[in-house]
Amino acid sequence: MAAQCDIPQSSLIHKEEPYALVILKSSRESHCHYCLGELPLDTVPCLSCSIPLYCSERCRAQAGGGSLVRHQEEQRDKSYGDSLEKHVMEVTSLHNSTTAVECFPEHKHECGGVHWPAVLPPDVVLAGRILAKHLSQTGILMNPETLITLGFSHNYSLIAQGTKLEVHIYASVLLCCLQHALGFELPVNAIYLSQTVILLSQIRVNAMAIIHMKSVDPRGPHAFTSTVEQVTVGQAIYKTGSMFNHSCQPNINAYFLSRTLFVRTTEVVQTGFPLELSYGPQVGQWDCCDRLQILEDKYSFRCRCSGCSELNIADLVLNAFHCANPDCIGVLLDTPVIKYETGKLTSSHKTSRLNGGSEVEKINVKSLVCLNLMSNNSSCHIKPASCLNCGHYCNLDAAREAVDNALSCMHSLEDAIASKEIPSMVLSDASRSLGLLRSVLHPYNKRIAESLLDEGKNFVVTLDAYPRTIGHAYLCINYYTCEEHLQAEDKLAQGFCWTGDLRSSKGLCSSSIKILEVLYGNDHIVIGYELIKLATIQLSLDDPEVAKTITRLEKIFLRYFGAHANLVLPYLETLKKESLPLHRQFSSVEI
């Protein structure tokens, strides 16, 4: 898909209801099986089976788990009294505003006392809902060759033999279950089986994960920070939304309100330029080598986006080592990284990213890499363990050993944080280890930044960002809290929080944001989430700078979510309200 005209930043370019949707098993007890909102205490069960739970009778009726006519009669006969206002709010709320949307009873064929939807994997249940909807719209006496009309690509021919066998077994089981549930003779023959196998393969490559944001404001003796999580609650097929191509440097952002998909530009997109979102990996999150491997394993294609074909600072420094020459800020690359970066240098676009990037990025790249290396094809040979800038050699085996020793201290700190008892010796050892990491790893190495940031899983923000499932949904990725990177400065910041040293924690958080700005850019959504961490610490310190922090993070969220920013992240409004008295207090002092 490409822009048909110049599109401004933060423009809403697409809105779509799912063709078919299913809740994930992990969310069955906590989220409505239709609108995917959080369940209230008084849940509404299906009238005929014990599988789904709903937040309201309206959702139950729309899902096909109950009669819409019965629901309407019950509403007419019901006396609301003092709860009338609550009822009006419920009916007119965002997640129930689907009156004008085509409503297929997606649970009806599953509602026969048989619990196969609770046993089979979500993607198989989703395939069943697609088949049931398709058959209800077209009829069973049709040409089986046109059974599936999604029009999506698939990677069946490229998957392993064991996976193919698994898909065939699930397809056979699903057809038998549907035959029993639909009440008519659904042929379980080679043609129908092959079409169902293709459908399952299409889902595995094109289904999208439905992500909801959850904000938690903890109360307790150590409640210095708040937690914001993104929860993967469902998996769905969007017939248009699933057609967007991937880029490791996307220019659009996909997000969800209830079941509805919204797609918004994150930068100005000129006429004719492709509109691309991320299927998971992005520049700044993983280096080029890892991104290519992930996409090839999950989607069976080799990415040729600008991030994977043009030189960029993030791929150079993400996992780089520090030059042994203390006066040089050049990078030392490991052998696997060298292969891919050399390929970029020899490509026809070797300088386009450098020339088209920001001034800060151009300066940084020029200080990291010898200019002759970038401009002279005959010099495109990068030596392992040699600085790209000054050529100084470094013993990478010794450097790796030092990093491993430092990270073991960080693991000890992580264990101490989990036990909520942090001895002073553990904290001091971790501080020394951070110094060691800074001396061995490049200053922009992501392990240092994330060591500053995440503080384990419960510091300020834990976020699984931008996944796409089994296809676009099962690849649940966190931009800045990857498990292998829960290290030094992250853990130290959390440790300082637990010991009450918020000023040290603030300093570590600020330092990590500076590193992530180099990796992602100043206005990336990752920076926004880290600014939430910083803002919560600043509020605890009565720091007047919190107003600037909140203004900046609000600008970032408006870029990615537009007018929906406060709906996607309700905690943003809470931060603004809590900072207002502090802002007024210091404003009056200045006057």
Image (cartoon, rainbow, N blue to C red):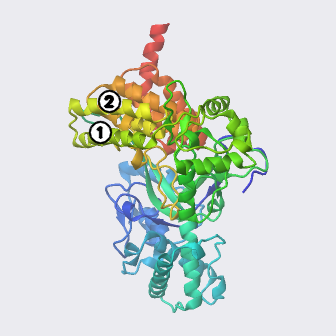
On the question of residue 501 being in view, the answer is yes
- Which of the 4 image quarters holds residue 497? top left
Residue 150 left/right relative to 35: right
The residue that disc 1 covers is 409
Residue 199 left/right relative to 378: left
What is the x, y in percent for residue 2? 74, 54
What is the x, y in percent for residue 63? 47, 68
Query: Which quadrant does the N terminus fall into?
Result: bottom right
Secondary structure under the numbered disc 2 in the rendered image: helix
Looking at marks 2 and 1 on the same chain, the residue that comes earlier in the sequence is marked by 1
Residue drawn 61% across and 71% down?
A: 154
Q: CA distance from mark 2 to mark 1?
A: 9 Å
Mark 2 in CB contact with mark 1 (< 8 angstroms):
yes
On the question of residue 250 being in view, the answer is no
What is the x, y in percent for residue 289? 56, 52
Residue drawn 62% across and 52% down?
A: 277
What is the crowding at mark 1: few (fewer than 14 residues within 10 Å), some, or many (at least 20)? many
What amino acid does circle 2 point to?
A: Arg
Residue 116 left/right relative to 95: left
The residue that disc 2 covers is 432
- Which of the 4 image quarters holds residue 242? bottom right
From the viewer's perspective, is residue 71 above or below residue 488? below
Q: Closest to the observer: 274 or 558? A: 274
What is the crowding at mark 2: few (fewer than 14 residues within 10 Å), some, or many (at least 20)? some
Residue 309 left/right relative to 519: right
Q: How many numbered marks appear?
A: 2
Q: Closest to the observer: 335 or 82? A: 335
What amino acid does circle 1 point to?
A: Cys
Residue drawn 41% across and 60% down?
A: 32
